[in-house]
Structure formats: structure tokens, C-alpha cells
């Protein structure tokens, strides 16, 4: 976990983001900040608007109102790399081809290629077609693509989806390792226990709106102020109290 988050510079921020699909409001007046060198978790149940928010933040689709700003003068493209959930990029190509293409096309971090492949246990899969991978294997390849990208901020939609318990714990350690070397991570997570273990700060999303933002200690205090004394500091109880 990071120390005093007030010492970290704001890397990206969203103010008043809203997005509608016809009569349905997917996200409403959403604001949050991401500071350099931290792991921020966007937490909410399925259907809360997490993927829509990620796509608007990353520039994949336009939002109806609000702003997204980045501290780097070059803006979004050179600051944030977005890793969607549930896709199979270049399904007819091998894992090795996809990773090498990532390095070449995006100007990726060639110096960490061997470490990423080893840490995510991709060596046995390098010659396998992306379309032939299991859900968990494909997730590990997507994580590798994100970590090999040159951008300082990596936004990952559901980084633990499709992984078993042991793999999830391993990925947590890998992500924390990369943050220690200067990366910043924005993770969309619906599994509360996973989020509580890895994230430094949290943005809680419910029905398309942010209901709270802060560290575990800050959210604990806020929950206690709303519902009285908590039975324990379990993050699931805190989340339920605030949503």
C-alpha cells in the first residue's frame, strides 16, 4: 500500500462524467482522481456502470457531459492504456505474435518482456492461438499486453475475472511489483475481497453514481458515520454500508 497519498501528484481526474444510452443513464455526474504510483479500485456490482465509466475515461466512447484531464501535457493517449475484459485480440495469431506486436505497434517495454512472460506463466502458451485459449489463459495474456504497454497508467477492466484463487493471488503480487517500479493502476473489480487486498484507494460506484471515494480507513470512518459502529472492518461490510 502507498503511504501518505497526499504526497502523490494527481495523474488523472474525471469531473462530472455522465453517459446515457437512450433513456438509460449508465453513469451520472461521476468524479474521481488517480494519483501517481497508486492502485485505485473502481468497485461496484455487475451493472453499476463500471465498464461504461472505463470506456469513457479511456476514450473508447464519448461521454455526454463532464471532463477527463491528465497531468501529462501530451494527454490521454500517452498517459493511459486500457485493457478491456472478455476480448480475444487477433484470435488467429499466437500468443507470442500478439505480445511481440504489442511491443512493436505501441512502442512497448521490451526490457520487461521476459519478466512479464515468466511471471504470468505464458511460456507454455507462446505458440498457442489466442482463439484457442481458455478464459483464464486469455486474461493472463491481456494482463501481459497491459503491463508491456509504454503508458504510465494502465486501466484494467476485471483483472481477476477467469482466474482461480491461486492465480488471482499471483496476479495481485505481479501488479503490485509493477506499481513499485513506477506504474499506476486503475482497476475495475466486482469481487470485493480481491479489491480490499490490492487497492490503495477506492471509488465506490452504485447505479452509475459515485457514492464514496477514499482509502480503507477513510471509507471505514464514513461508513461508521452513516450507520453507527461497524461490527468489523471487513471491506464487504463497509461497501454494503456505503452503497
Image (cartoon, rainbow, N blue to C red):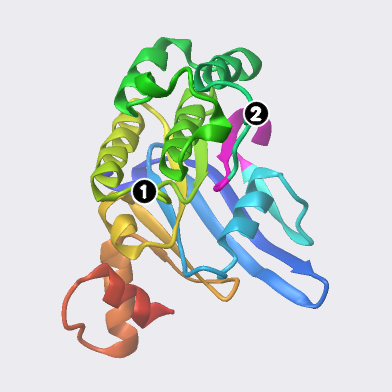
Provide the secondary structure element on which disc 2 rests.
loop
Which of the pair 180/84 is nearer the observer? 84
Q: Is residue 10 above or below residue 178?
A: below
Which of the pair 62/118 is nearer the observer? 118
Q: Is residue 109 above or below residue 75?
A: above
In this orientation, does residue 65 appear? yes
Residue sitting at the far front: 132
**Residue that carries the numbered disc 2 in the rendered image:** 90
Residue sitting at the far right: 22
- Mark 1 packing: few (<14 Cα in 10 Å), some, or many (20+)? few
Give the residue at x 16% y 77%: 232
**Residue that carries the numbered disc 1 in the rendered image:** 6
In this orientation, does residue 71 appear? no
Q: Is residue 124 left or right of residue 67?
A: left
Magenta stretch, residue numbers: 70-86
Label 1 to label 2: alpha-carbon separation: 41 Å
Give the residue at x 26% y 50%: 165
Provide the secondary structure element on which disc 1 rests.
helix
Where the C terminus falls, by quadrant?
bottom left
Amino acid at each position: 500500500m502507498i503511504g501518505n497519498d497526499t504526497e502523490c501528484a494527481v495523474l488523472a481526474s474525471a469531473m462530472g462524467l455522465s453517459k446515457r444510452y437512450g433513456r438509460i443513464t449508465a453513469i451520472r455526474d461521476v468524479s474521481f482522481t488517480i494519483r501517481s504510483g497508486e492502485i485505485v479500485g473502481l468497485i461496484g456490482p455487475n451493472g453499476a456502470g463500471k465498464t461504461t465509466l472505463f470506456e469513457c475515461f479511456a476514450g473508447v466512447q464519448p461521454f455526454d457531459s463532464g471532463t477527463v484531464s491528465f497531468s501529462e501535457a501530451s494527454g490521454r493517449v500517452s498517459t493511459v492504456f486500457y485493457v478491456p475484459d472478455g476480448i480475444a485480440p487477433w484470435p488467429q495469431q499466437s500468443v507470442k505474435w500478439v505480445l511481440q506486436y504489442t511491443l512493436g505497434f505501441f512502442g512497448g517495454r521490451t526490457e520487461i518482456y521476459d519478466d512479464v512472460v515468466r511471471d504470468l506463466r505464458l511460456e507454455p502458451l507462446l505458440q498457442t492461438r489466442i482463439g484457442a485459449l481458455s478464459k483464464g489463459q486469455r486474461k493472463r495474456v491481456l494482463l501481459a499486453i497491459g503491463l508491456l504497454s509504454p503508458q504510465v497508467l494502465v486501466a484494467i477492466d476485471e483483472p481477476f475475472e477467469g482466474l482461480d484463487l491461486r492465480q488471482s493471488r499471483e496476479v495481485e503480487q505481479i501488479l503490485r511489483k509493477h506499481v513499485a517500479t513506477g506504474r499506476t493502476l486503475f482497476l475495475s473489480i466486482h469481487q470485493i475481497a480481491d479489491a480490499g487486498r490490492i487497492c490503495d484507494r477506492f471509488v465506490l460506484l452504485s447505479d452509475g453514481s459515485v457514492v464514496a471515494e477514499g482509502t480503507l480507513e477513510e471509507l471505514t470512518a464514513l461508513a461508521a458515520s452513516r450507520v453507527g459502529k461497524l461490527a468489523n472492518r471487513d471491506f464487504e461490510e463497509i461497501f454494503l454500508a456505503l452503497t
